[in-house]
Image (spheres, rainbow, N blue to C red):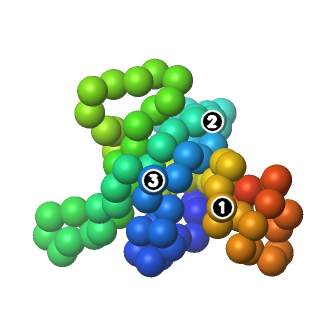
Amino acid sequence: MAKLDLTQAADLIGSYVLVETVCDSEPIPEQYCMQLVGVVPPLAGVIEHPYFLVMDLLAPSKFPEELFWHNIQSLIVLGSEVASARKELMPEEGIMIC
């Protein structure tokens, strides 16, 4: 599971990412190329787990889909200006949160 907080998640809105997900029902991780278009925080009694609203770049749809944080094994920001601001990574490597 990726270690995210709401501040980090909000900073990623608009980013294009490569995400590796794991689910209890799927034994093999899957990878997706997406754009993060929103974030939904947990809300007591309504939303148990936080999630991103995403647009899948390879299977476009009219409306965003949910990507729950607990299903994210790794997340790499692609071609981001933010990457060059991070001293621990080279700009061409992107940013990896895992």
Q: Is residue 74 visible?
A: no
Tag count = 3
Q: Quadrant of residue 27?
A: top right
Q: Residue at x 66, y 61 (%)?
A: 81
Picture disc at residue 45? none
Gap between marks 3 and 1, in whole Å? 12 Å
Q: Residue at x 82, y 67 (%)?
A: 89
Above or below, 36 against 89 in this view is above
Identify residue for label 3.
14
Q: Residues within 10 Å of mark 3 (few under 14, many from 20)?
A: few
Above or below, 56 against 37 in this view is above
Task: Give the SS element for disc 1.
Answer: helix
Identify residue for label 2.
31
Q: Residue at x 81, y 55 (%)?
A: 93
- Label 3 or label 1, whichever lies nearer to me, is 1
Q: Amino acid at mark 1?
A: Glu
Residue 18 image point, x, y percent: 63, 43
Q: Quadrant of residue 1?
A: bottom right
Identify residue for label 1.
81
Q: Is residue 77 visible?
A: yes
Q: Amino acid at mark 3?
A: Gly
